[in-house]
Amino acid sequence: MITFYDLAAKDPIKCWSFNPWKVRYVLNLKKIPYRTIYVDFGTSTNSDGTPVHTVPSIIDDKTGEAVTDSYKIVEYLDKRYPDTPKAFPPGTEALQAAFYKYFNEQTWDLAILIIHSVPNILSKESSLEYYHRSRAAWFGKPVEQIRPVGEELEKLWEKAHAFFDALEGWYAKSSGSFLVGDTPSFGDFVVVALFRSMRIVRGEDSEDWRKLSTMNNGRWVKLLNDLEKYASVEN
Ligand SMILES: N[C@@H](CCC(=O)N[C@@H](CS)C(=O)NCC(=O)O)C(=O)O
């Protein structure tokens, strides 16, 4: 059995953050038995007080191994469970790595859009306090002021549109509806994890979700729906 560490939120919200979503999708794709432990922010720090990135992490009872970082966890699962569907289909490993790096670089600004809304879904006072303190220190301003506004926000969306137009062009070259033909793979889960996180944290009625969900005529919501069978949070 695998123990999967995810971030806690107010009931009934489960799995809201995009890095854990990448791992959950892959665990479900592989049908590997796992159980989730939801942890609060700020529960683990280095001796100098800086945060340790602990989520997502897994502990695998079968091998005794503990792995942290979504990409490394997925590599581990492909290696240790070779008879399950591959998140990195053979021969695509290098391209998946390049895709992942580029996707993260291009969508980092979008990820920033959810930061001011995260306190609304955190359940514990200690988690909230840590979240406000750590994000204010990273960005050099209070959480409420991190979200870009005005021209900066417009530019952010222009950049996002240009990126997703390019992404749509790449997907159009695939022989199927996924990045690797008809086989769902890590790259697809990375894309939908961002959309899922945005929908949960900003809300379906938000302007951000309206913009994202209508991008490329709903191309990415279609991908999200196509991968819904791997989105169970029952474990
Ligand atoms: N590169 C890591 C990033 C992990 C990460 O940033 N995790 C966040 C939550 S999604 C975290 O644990 N933050 C702890 C903190 O802010 O103290 C991955 O892909 O898993």
Image (cartoon, rainbow, N blue to C red):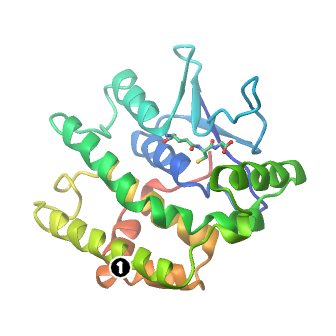
Residue at image position (46%, 32%) is: 73
Quick one: quadrant of the C terminus? Answer: top right
What residue sits 61% from the left and 71% below the top? 147
In which of the image's four quarters is ligand 1 placed? top right
Q: Residue furthest right?
A: 125
Q: Is residue 130 among what the camera can see? A: yes
Horizontal and vertical percent position of residue 212: 43, 77
Farthest top residue in view: 64
Q: Is residue 183 above or below residue 222?
A: above
Query: For the residue marked with disc 1, what is the amino acid?
Result: Glu
Please say if 207 is above or below 148: below
162 and 216: which one is in front? 162
In this picture, residue 54 sits left or right of residue 160: right
Q: How many numbered marks are there?
A: 1
Q: Is label 1 in a helix, a strand or a loop?
A: helix
The picture quadrant where one finds residue 51 is: top right
Reply above or below: 40 against 90.
below
Circle 1 sits on which residue? 158
Residue 12 shows in the view: no
Residue 138 appears at what percent x and percent y?
64, 50
Q: Residue at x 38, y 25 (%)?
A: 81
Classify mark 1: residues with Cα within 10 Å, few (<14), some (14-19) or many (20+): few
